[in-house]
Amino acid sequence: MKKHILNLTVTKVEAPASAFVLLRMRPVEGRMPACEPGQFAQLRVDAPGVFLRRPISIHDVEDDEVSFLVQTVGEGTRWLASLKVGNAVNAVMPLGRGFTFYPETHQVLLVGGGVGVAPLYFLGKTLKERGVRPTFLLGARTRDMLLRLDDFRELGDVFVTTEDGSEGERGFVTQHSLWSERSFDLVQTCGPGPMMRAVAHLATDKGMSCEASLENRMACGVGACLCCVEDTRHGHRCVCAEGPVFDVAELKW
Ligand SMILES: Cc1cc2nc3c(=O)[nH]c(=O)nc-3n(C[C@H](O)[C@H](O)[C@H](O)COP(=O)(O)OP(=O)(O)OC[C@H]3O[C@@H](n4cnc5c(N)ncnc54)[C@H](O)[C@@H]3O)c2cc1C
Ligand code: FES
């Protein structure tokens, strides 16, 4: 899929939770290129001392508007969170290989943790458009960190875990009773590494196929610097160019 270098203008800024920002942007000129769920953008950060672009998942594409859901963790994401309507951002997108869509697969579970829910919104929306009603299992430390639950509920059934039990079932996503009550053909997940590994093991033990979107540290984002490499069963793979989505059977998890 062709990569584009785009100048985007911020059209809307929302704060779905403390330390999270939802940015909507549209190209200054021309149209938004076609994007697939699980792909990402490399956003240029014009903050002092930040030299590398930051990889951020495509959270949604609607008409010619793209949105990004960002958690502030350091200088780069703090700069993104400080953007105002009308500000400009340079993006290289769409990048990477996204989630797989299997036309015959209808029982799909999307498992997200923290800001890992970001690509699952676009994935869930696309599945719904293709006639599949996805089930979401979304986890966070506490209810204040659950993101856009009402919007996810418009796409499918939503189950929730929080570590402190303030919303949904108490514990981790892998401890939810859904796993013993329902069976799925495919599990697609994004979130912290340990969570995705646990989800991958659980899904595999239950005979379900599973794809995970890796968030290895990245620099170039286009397969040139090799800093994002993952050692897989088929050798070393660039997560930015050959992922970020992998079938977990390929991974040495
Ligand atoms: C393919 C991909 C998609 C991503 N999508 C999103 C998204 O939709 N929303 C979002 O908020 N974030 C996303 N991230 C993570 C995001 O890129 C990092 O949080 C960001 O680059 C941190 O930049 P910074 O300058 O704010 O922090 P830095 O100063 O670079 O780092 C601050 C802290 O965050 C940690 N950190 C930085 N990058 C990562 C990473 N990739 N994984 C785990 N820890 C990291 C560092 O170890 C450090 O502790 C994604 C990452 C990848 C690889
Ligand atoms: S980030 Fe440079 S090769 Fe992946």
Image (cartoon, rainbow, N blue to C red):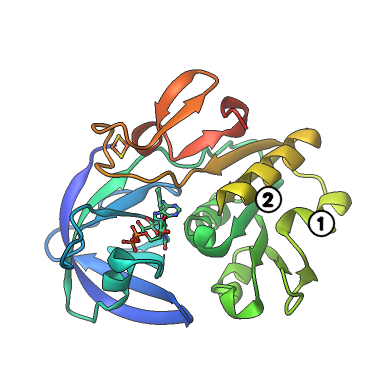
Label 2 to label 1: alpha-carbon separation:
10 Å
Task: Name the disc covering residue 17, or none.
Answer: none
In this view, 157 is above or below 133? below
Indicate the quadrant containing the N terminus: top left, top right, bottom left or bottom right: top left
Look at the numbered disc 2 and give the secondary structure of its residue.
strand
Q: Is any part of residue 60 visible from this angle?
A: yes
Residue sitting nearer the eye, 40 or 151? 40
Q: Earlier in the sequence, mark 2 or mark 1?
A: 2
Say left or right for 216 vs 121.
Answer: left
Residue sitting nearer the eye, 33 or 149? 149
- What's under tag 2, amino acid-wise? Leu
- Residue at 34% x, 34% y: name it: 241
Q: Are marks 2 and 1 in contact (CB under 8 Å)?
A: yes
Residue sitting nearer the eye, 106 or 92? 92
In this view, 94 is above or below 46? above
**Dividing the picture into quarters, in which one does residue 43 lie?**
bottom left
Q: Position of residue 202 (x, y in %)?
A: 76, 42
| Label 2 crowd bin: few (<14), some (14–19), many (20+), radius 10 Å | many
- Residue at 79% x, 34% y: name it: 205
Task: Name the disc covering residue 178, or none.
Answer: 1
Q: Position of residue 141 (x, y in %)?
A: 64, 70
Residue sitting nearer the eye, 75 or 128? 75
Q: Where does label 2 land, which residue?
A: 109
Q: Position of residue 111 (x, y in %)?
A: 64, 54
- Residue at 62% x, 33% y: name it: 253
Q: Position of residue 72 (x, y in %)?
A: 39, 70
Q: Is any part of residue 106 visible from this angle?
A: no
